[in-house]
């Protein structure tokens, strides 16, 4: 009973969760150390911070949420990509418009 | 699977899939779609925050008031709870009900600690003169962080009710799906928090 369910919905092994957890800890620690010790400034710092956050998002998608193990057709992945496209449009579009549309 | 023929590849792996989909798997997929729409909700709040982040109207600024100690603790607590909710799913896959309920309880306790720290932080901010009505920045801040906190609080209630169901009914296909969904929700909240931590806290004190 338990065996036959292993393949779908709740996959994953202890190893994948531990790897995901360790990678997440490292990816949280790096930006924290950089910010608390003022190691970087300006745009490079922002790129590093956002980069670590996005990487951690990917780590959690693969190691915690098991996106890679989804069987075809990959509906979950498709919905996710659509959602990301909408979010990026909203965020980048808002920032863009409000930056260049200031009435001085 | 190696041949990747389009229609029949879905039929591999589970025993009871003769043409139509497993309803529990379909519910799982429906929940995934909800999570994506929730992402869009947070996306609009992040966009608002990004646009308003300099608008403190001469009032208190985030770099004066943010205390990173509590925020760092919240971050590691929520990250650990995301891991323990994964351990709960692993116990469930082994058919270990005690382990499952135990790890869910650890997850819920960590979640409660997170909420406790967040409420303490909010009370302190309001005491120091930064309430939701103080300036556009603080409105955006409390709306974004508060919405995430509400999600976590709701998740706590939900997780406790699933623990009660598990104690009563054991691990059935239905409770199995519910545990899978709540742990997915919990991972999602951790992912949102990563961006809150980075964009709201780290970038403001930088």
Image: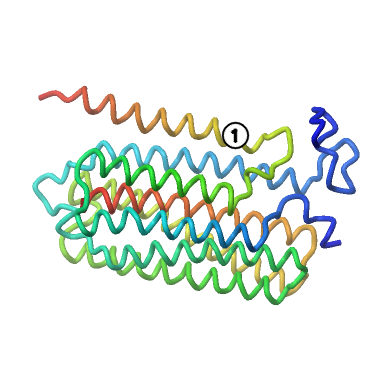
Q: Is residue A53 left or right of residue B26?
A: left
Q: How many marks?
A: 1
For the rendered model, the colour scheme is rainbow
Q: Is residue B72 above or below residue A50?
A: below
Q: Where is residue B189 in the image (x, y as percent from the top left)?
A: 49, 54
Q: Nearer the viewer, residue B44 or A63?
A: A63
Q: In this view, does A81 lie to the left or right of B127?
A: right
* Quarter location, residue A73: top right
Q: Is residue A20 above or below residue A58?
A: below
In the rendered image, which quarter contains the N terminus of chain A?
A: bottom right
Q: In this view, does B151 lie to the left or right of A1?
A: left
Q: In this view, does B99 lie above or below A64?
A: below
Q: Position of residue A69 (x, y in %)?
A: 68, 45
Q: Where is residue B1 in the image (x, y as percent from the top left)?
A: 80, 37
Q: Residue at x 53, y 51 (%)?
A: A60
Q: Which of B147 and A57 is in front in this view?
A: A57
Q: Where is residue B129 in the image (x, y as percent from the top left)?
A: 15, 60
Q: Is residue B155 above or below residue A101?
A: below
Dot 1 falls on which chain? A
In the rendered image, which quarter contains the C terminus of chain A?
A: top left
For label 1, the residue is A79
Q: In this view, does B173 lie to the left or right of A97?
A: right
Q: Nearer the viewer, residue B54 or A40?
A: A40
* Quarter location, residue B87: bottom right
Q: Which residue is drawn at 47% across and 59% down?
A: B152
Mark 1, other Cα within 10 Å: few <14 / some 14–19 / many ≥20 = some
Q: Which residue is drawn at 79% across and 30% down?
A: B4
Query: Considering the numbered disc 1 on the image, is that residue within a helix, a strand or a loop?
Result: helix
Q: Which residue is drawn at 78% across and 51% down?
A: A7
């Amino acid at each position: 009973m338990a065996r036959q369910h292993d393949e779908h919905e709740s996959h994953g092994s202890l190893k994948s969760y531990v790897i995901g957890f360790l990678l997440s800890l490292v990816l949280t620690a790096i930006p924290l150390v950089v910010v608390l010790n003022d190691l970087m400034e300006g745009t490079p710092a922002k790129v590093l911070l956002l980069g670590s956050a996005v990487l951690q998002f990917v780590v959690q998608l693969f190691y915690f949420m098991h996106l890679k193990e989804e069987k075809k057709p990959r509906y979950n992945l498709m919905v996710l990509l659509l959602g990301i496209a909408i979010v990026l449009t909203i965020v980048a579009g808002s920032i863009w418009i409000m930056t260049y549309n200031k009435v001085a | 699977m190696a041949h990747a023929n389009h229609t029949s590849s879905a039929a591999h792996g589970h025993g009871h899939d003769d043409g139509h989909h497993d309803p529990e798997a379909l519910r799982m997929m429906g929940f995934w779609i909800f999570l994506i729409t929730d992402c869009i909700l947070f996306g609009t709040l992040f966009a608002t925050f990004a646009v308003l982040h300099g608008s403190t109207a001469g009032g208190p600024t985030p770099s004066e008031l943010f205390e990173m100690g509590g925020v760092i603790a919240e971050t590691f607590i929520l990250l650990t709870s995301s891991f323990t909710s994964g351990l709960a799913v692993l116990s469930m896959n082994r058919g270990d009900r005690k382990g499952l309920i135990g790890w869910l309880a650890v997850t819920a306790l960590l979640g409660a600690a997170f909420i406790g720290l967040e409420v303490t932080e909010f009370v302190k901010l309001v005491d120091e003169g930064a309430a939701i009505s103080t300036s556009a920045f603080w409105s955006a801040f409390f709306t974004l962080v508060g919405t995430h906190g509400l999600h976590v609080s709701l998740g706590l209630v939900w997780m406790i009710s699933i623990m009660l169901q598990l104690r009563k009914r054991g691990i059935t296909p239905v409770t199995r799906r519910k545990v899978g969904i709540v742990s997915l929700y919990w991972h999602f909240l951790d992912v949102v928090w990563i961006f809150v931590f980075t964009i709201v806290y780290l970038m403001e004190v930088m």
